[in-house]
Image (cartoon, rainbow, N blue to C red):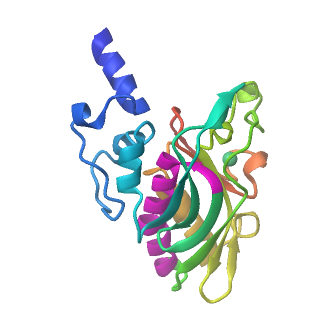
């Protein structure tokens, strides 16, 4: 029982080599990939797998040097992201695992939702950053814990730029009615397949103007 539990935790954490877990490398273009969460987790500790997985055209990312952890802050196996799912998004430091999740979410959730609800593609994401050495904000229960941003394992997204020039903003359109709000709700809900924690304006006031998406150890979709 203990061994089974340890194996499950190790697989969830991406510690078990993917060959032992018997998981094939993830294809970012595969919309129907099985075990996508565990296969994303397998990227966290595997630079070689990261290099072979993060390939164009679904992602534009350059590996960056590790920042050794000090006081719970730093990163390992991260990239500088300039494009995901064929749109522009600039994040200077983001873990390989979170970058891959972002690309899959954009390609398989965001663009289809844009076509369905807005009839035009998204050309860029406006973000509020990736890495930030800080604790979790906005929730007393968690305020003594480091945020996933402290390890570059999270991305905050505030708005979506459309090909026709419109900007769909979470702060402005989340509580509205109509296609913009439908689009935002679809991309929020769809993010839960690729990220472990997805927080938006319905979670708390600290997230009134952005979606927080991370690949930490918790699982929550609010
Ligand atoms: Zn965040």
Apparent side of residue 142 relative to residue 111 in the rendered image (left or right) = right
Along the viewing direction, whichever of 68 and 180 lies nearer the viewer: 68
**Left of 48 or right of it: where is 211?**
right
Horizontal arrangement in the rendering, residue 142 relative to residue 180 (left or right): right
Q: Residue 82 versus residue 122: which sits nearer the camera?
A: 82
Majority SS type along the magenta span: helix
Tell me: residue 175, above or below residue 100: below
Q: Residue 185, image x and y in percent?
A: 57, 62
For the question of whether residue 199 can be seen, the reply is: no
Q: Is residue 80 magenta-colored?
A: no
What are the residue bounds of the magenta stretch?
Answer: 92-116
Q: Residue at x 53, y 58 (%)?
A: 62
At which x and y percent is residue 98? Answer: 52, 49
Q: Residue 137: where, in percent of width, then height?
A: 77, 38
Q: For the view shown, which residue lies furthest in the top direction?
A: 2
Image quadrant in which the N terminus is located: top left
Q: Position of residue 3 (x, y in %)?
A: 29, 12
Is residue 61 shown left or right of residue 12?
Answer: right
The quarter of the displayed image where residue 220 is located: top right
Hey, which quadrant is residue 82 in on the image?
A: bottom right
Is residue 22 visible in this depiction of the protein? yes
Residue at 34%, 17% (x, y): give it.
Answer: 5
Residue most extreme to the bottom: 164
**Residue 168's quadrant in the figure?**
bottom right
Task: Identify the residue at horizontal 23%, vertical 31% (top origin).
Answer: 20
| Residue found at x 68% / y 46% | 131
């Amino acid at each position: 029982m203990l061994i089974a539990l340890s194996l499950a935790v190790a697989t969830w954490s991406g510690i078990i080599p993917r060959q032992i877990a018997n998981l094939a490398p993830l294809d970012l273009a595969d919309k129907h990939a099985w075990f996508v969460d565990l296969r994303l987790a397998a990227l966290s500790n595997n630079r070689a797998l990261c290099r072979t997985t993060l390939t164009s055209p679904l992602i534009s990312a350059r590996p960056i040097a590790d920042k050794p952890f000090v006081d719970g802050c730093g990163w390992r196996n991260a990239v500088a992201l300039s494009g995901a799912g064929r749109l522009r998004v600039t994040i200077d430091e983001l873990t390989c695992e979170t970058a891959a999740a972002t690309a899959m979410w954009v390609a398989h959730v965001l663009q289809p939702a844009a076509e369905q609800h807005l009839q035009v593609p998204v050309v860029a994401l406006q973000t509020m950053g990736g890495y930030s050495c800080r604790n979790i904000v906005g929730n007393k229960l968690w305020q003594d814990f480091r945020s996933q941003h402290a390890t570059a394992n999270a991305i905050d997204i505030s708005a979506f730029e459309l090909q026709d020039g419109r900007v769909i903003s979470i702060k402005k359109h989340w509580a509205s009615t109509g296609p913009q709000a439908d689009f935002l709700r679809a991309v929020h809900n769809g993010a839960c397949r690729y990220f472990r924690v997805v927080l938006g304006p319905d979670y708390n006031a600290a997230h009134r103007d952005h979606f927080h998406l991370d690949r930490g150890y918790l699982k929550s979709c609010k």
